[in-house]
């Protein structure tokens, strides 16, 4: 684009932008100090209720020269020549929005230095056929704004004003008149490059553009016809504008894509670079499709940038991308309704470098319907130019063959998408597809061609629940934004396809906390991103980070971990972060930072000769002496802590401490944190050892009682039967026999037959223990539900753990639940030395009698008599004790 065109475009926008100057450069000035002087030579009196004569009179008496004056919004309804006396030195005058009705003939005659004049938003009769108002404007004028001064609904009374004397005029803003043609007098404006007739800043009632409409302004490079009620354009409408570089036809909701046939035809004869064709349909309605015939002639233009946004566009006709000119680099297609079609397999046919397609399927408020303009549907459109040679099949086929990334689809022939590899434009560098309601899991995606040049991808604000991948390769990718995508899983291999040059990765505002904190997968996620400089992980509900998660990020400069649930970073390895300078940890639960991390950032700052910063706002920093080193560092380097005055400090008692109080605490930290650690530790150890020995002795001494209590607690409520009367306890069994399995024959062959013959109900584990129950529970329950426990004491019995357990549980039953009445009958079976017995059993034997079994047939009847008496005697003793209770 030519330098002059760039300059004119800047004038268009700069005149609508307020001059933002620092407050120290603004001073009250003007009459009664009602104005603001903004920089050298600029006086702003907008909305000051001053009249023009007063201000110009003031300027005539000033010691310094004012060249720019803003008198907008002051209700100046009329201008006379004498009102401008004293303002002859001005180069720029703004009189917009004053409801000005008229002005004296040639009132601006004495303002020969004026180069910019803004009369926008008044009620002057500049565009009325009669009377023909002559303001006496200076020939040096370069920019004139007279838009918003007429009612364009009365076309018979309007005409474009005579401006033939303004031979240096470069930019003209005025209202667009219905069906009006620029008169031949405009041929004298040979420097006119910018013409703005937009209904967005004024009023525009242009319905048709004829071949003759712009014939007399052939020097235009910038033409704005946005929001002009356009419905039809002749095929030669812009043909005379051979220098035209920028054309804005946006917000003409009745143009439609069919009008592009004539527009693209006439643009062949221009130097067109930028075409804005956004919103040429109503907001609400059926989706639209771009046909080949609509854009056919664009093939023969020098177009660089095109805008198709806000058109409900869903599809491009197959093979239409082949017609895009090779010069086209930037495509804007935001706020449409794209759906899948074969055109997506042909995007490689274009040579674009930037694509902007955000806000697909974006919802619109129903009230926007009322804002749509109304039209007379009986309107008859102008004829279309439909004979385009570029859309013929041989041309399309041959053009496709010249580009190895471009596919041509034969009409009527079926295409299998599964077997078709889509190619991206080889030179594509930037893609934006934000907030487009895309709901997918990102699976494995190969990007063809592999040597693509994509550097910037922004697909934030969509719904990508899982990032599985791998995706790529992107050998040139430097910027990737996947934020706000509702993602809860990212595969460790997501970035593993090929080498990456990624420098900025934004994945904030997701739910990646679980996978990032995983000790196995977390450290692998960023392994291939060794060139990364900026990493944003904020708002991901991260509870912790594994030690090696940033191991390969040697070039990382900025790390954002704000708005998570982190409590510490002490375990994260930081030795490799040799370029880290900015760390954002605000809004977490961090109480301190390890000094090695802070020292690493400080060393980086010195080595790189750059400042470093840490943000720990909205964390609760507890004044605990174990963080002494961190507090000293924080006090010394508080200037590197972002918003340090806003930090939250809390004492161990929970009281809030101000930053000033924290600094005083650090000054006396050696005294406040004097260590009595060794004394406390030694005393604690001594006390712990004493208590351990004491408690251990008590437990050992009462170990069987403790075991008995724990085991019997579960069956306590079932241990006794209902009383038949108040004097007798009912037991399930008369006798429980505990024996070693080696003595089983003695029990089965001798004891059981004899005891059952004598009427005893006997319980023993081979018959009565419930399978699946805990053995200890079975033993305790058997003892509790039997009047007596018979111990067959042998050498084998002493070697069995469960046998000894049964003896001790019976002993505890006798001592604590049967009023010290022994329910144990010991039958000595074989020779046993006292040294083989445990202490508890030996003590019992010494203080209680026992029965010794003999296999001598002469004495065996006596054994059974003694055993029967012993069992019955214990029953009677038990009953007597129960009665006494």
Image: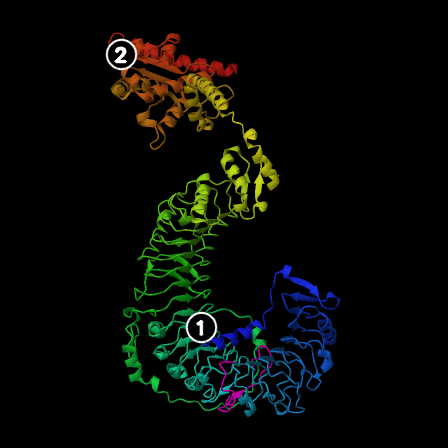
| Distance from Cα at disc 1 to Cα at disc 2 | 103 Å
Q: Which class describes the residues within 10 Å of circle 2: few (<14), some (14-19), or many (20+)?
A: some
The x, y position of residue 764, in whole percent, is 33, 23
Which of the two discs, 1 and 2, labels the residue nearer the N terminus? 1
Q: Residue at x 36, y 80 (%)?
A: 323
In magenta stretch: residue 447: no
Task: Determine whether the residue tagged by mark 2 lies in a helix, strand or loop.
Answer: loop
Q: Position of residue 554 (x, y in %)?
A: 37, 49
Colouring = rainbow
Task: Kindly indicate whether the residue at mark 2 contacts the one at mark 1 (C-beta within 8 angstroms).
Answer: no
Count residues near mark 1 (Cα–Cα under 10 Å), then give few for <14, some for 14-19, many for 20+. Answer: many
In magenta, the rendered stretch is: 196-223
Say left or right for 368 vs 697.
Answer: right
Q: Which residue is mark 2?
A: 830
Q: Is residue 175 visible?
A: yes
Q: Main secondary structure of the magenta part?
A: loop
Picture coordinates of residue 307, whole percent (x, y): 46, 75
Q: Which residue was labeled with disc 1?
A: 333
State whether residue 772 is above or below residue 241.
Answer: above
Residue 217 among those drawn in magenta: yes
Foreground of the two, 476 or 683: 476
């Amino acid at each position: 684009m030519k330098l002059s065109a760039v300059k004119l475009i800047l004038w268009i926008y700069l005149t609508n932008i307020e001059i933002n100057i620092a407050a120290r450069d603004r001073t009250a000035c003007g009459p009664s100090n009602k104005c603001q002087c903004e920089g050298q030579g600029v006086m702003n009196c907008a909305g000051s209720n001053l009249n023009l004569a007063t201000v110009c009179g003031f300027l005539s008496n000033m010691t310094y020269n004012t060249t720019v004056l803003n008198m907008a919004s002051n209700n100046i309804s009329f201008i006379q020549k004498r009102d401008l006396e004293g303002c002859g030195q001005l180069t720029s005058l703004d009189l917009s929005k004053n409801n000005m009705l008229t002005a004296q003939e040639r009132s601006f005659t004495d303002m020969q230095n004026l180069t910019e004049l803004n009369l926008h938003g008044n009620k002057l009769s500049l565009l009325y056929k009669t009377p023909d108002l002559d303001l006496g404007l200076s020939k040096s004028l370069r920019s004139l704004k007279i838009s918003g001064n007429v009612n364009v609904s009365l076309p018979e009374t309007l005409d474009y004003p005579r401006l033939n004397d303004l031979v240096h005029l470069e930019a003209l803003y005025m209202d667009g008149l219905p069906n009006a043609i620029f008169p031949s007098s405009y041929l004298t404006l040979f420097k006119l490059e910018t013409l703005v007739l937009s209904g967005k800043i004024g009023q525009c009632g242009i319905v048709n553009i004829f071949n003759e409409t712009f014939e007399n302004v052939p020097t235009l490079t910038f033409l704005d016809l946005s929001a002009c009620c356009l419905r039809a354009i002749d095929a030669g409408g812009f043909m005379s504008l051979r220098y035209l570089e920028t054309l804005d036809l946006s917000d003409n909701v009745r143009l439609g894509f069919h009008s592009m046939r004539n527009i693209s035809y006439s643009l062949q004869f221009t130097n067109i670079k930028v075409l804005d064709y956004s919103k040429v349909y109503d907001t609400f309605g059926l989706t639209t499709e771009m046909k080949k015939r609509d854009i056919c002639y664009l093939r023969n233009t020098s177009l660089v940038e095109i805008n198709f946004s806000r058109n409900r566009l869903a599809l491009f006709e197959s093979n239409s991308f082949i017609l895009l000119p090779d010069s086209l680099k930037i495509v804007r297609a935001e706020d449409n309704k794209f759906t899948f079609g074969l055109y997506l397999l042909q995007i490689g046919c274009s040579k674009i470098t930037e694509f902007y397609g955000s806000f697909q399927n974006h919802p619109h408020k129903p009230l926007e319907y009322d804002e749509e303009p109304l039209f007379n549907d009986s309107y008859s459109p102008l004829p279309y130019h439909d004979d385009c040679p570029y859309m013929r099949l041989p041309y399309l086929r041959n053009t496709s063959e010249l580009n190895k990334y471009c596919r041509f689809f034969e009409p009527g022939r079926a295409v299998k998408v599964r077997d078709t590899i889509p190619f991206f434009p080889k030179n594509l560098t930037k893609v934006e597809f934000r907030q487009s309601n895309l709901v997918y899991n990102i699976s494995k995606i190969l990007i063809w061609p592999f040597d693509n040049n994509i550097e910037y991808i922004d697909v934030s604000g969509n719904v990508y629940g899982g990032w599985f991948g791998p995706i790529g390769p992107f050998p040139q990718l430097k910027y990737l934004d996947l934020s706000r995508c509702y993602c809860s899983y990212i595969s460790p291999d997501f970035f593993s396809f090929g080498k990456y040059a990624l420098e900025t990765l934004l994945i904030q505002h997701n739910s990646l906390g679980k996978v990032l904190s995983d000790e196995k997968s977390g450290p692998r996620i960023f392994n291939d991103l060794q060139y990364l400089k900026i990493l944003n992980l904020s708002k991901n509900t991260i509870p912790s980070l594994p030690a090696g998660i940033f191991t390969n990020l040697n070039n990382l400069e900025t790390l954002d971990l704000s708005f998570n649930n982190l409590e510490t970073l002490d375990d994260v390895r930081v030795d490799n972060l040799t370029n880290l300078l900015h760390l954002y940890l605000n809004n977490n639960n961090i109480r301190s930072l390890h000094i090695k991390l802070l020292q690493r950032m400080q060393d980086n700052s010195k080595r790189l000769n750059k400042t470093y910063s840490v943000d720990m706002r909205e964390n609760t920093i507890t004044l605990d002496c174990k963080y002494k080193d961190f507090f000293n560092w924080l006090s010394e380097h508080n200037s590197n802590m972002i918003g340090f005055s806003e930090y939250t400090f809390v004492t161990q008692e929970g009281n809030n401490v101000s930053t000033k109080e924290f600094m005083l605490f650090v000054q006396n930290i050696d005294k406040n944190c004097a260590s009595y650690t060794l004394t406390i530790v030694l005393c604690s150890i001594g006390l712990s050892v004493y208590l351990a020995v004491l408690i251990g002795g008590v437990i050992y001494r009462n170990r069987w009682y403790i075991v008995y209590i724990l085991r019997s607690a579960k069956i306590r409520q079932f241990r006794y039967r209902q009383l038949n009367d108040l004097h007798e306890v009912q037991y399930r069994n008369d006798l429980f026999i505990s024996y070693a399995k080696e003595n089983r024959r003695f029990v089965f062959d001798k004891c059981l037959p004899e005891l059952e013959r004598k009427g005893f109900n006997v319980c023993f584990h081979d018959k009565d223990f419930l399978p699946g129950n805990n053995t200890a529970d079975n033993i305790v329950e058997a003892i509790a539900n039997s009047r007596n426990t018979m111990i067959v004491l042998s050498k084998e019995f002493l070697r069995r753990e469960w046998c000894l357990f049964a003896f001790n549980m019976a002993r505890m039953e006798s001592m604590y639940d049967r009023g010290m009445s022994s329910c144990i009958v010991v039958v000595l079976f074989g020779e046993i030395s006292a040294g083989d017995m445990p202490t508890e059993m030996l003590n019992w034997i010494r203080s209680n009698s026992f029965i010794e079994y003999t296999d001598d047939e002469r004495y065996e009847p006596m054994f059974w008599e003694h055993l029967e008496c012993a069992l019955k005697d214990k029953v009677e003793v038990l009953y007597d004790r129960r009665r006494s209770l």
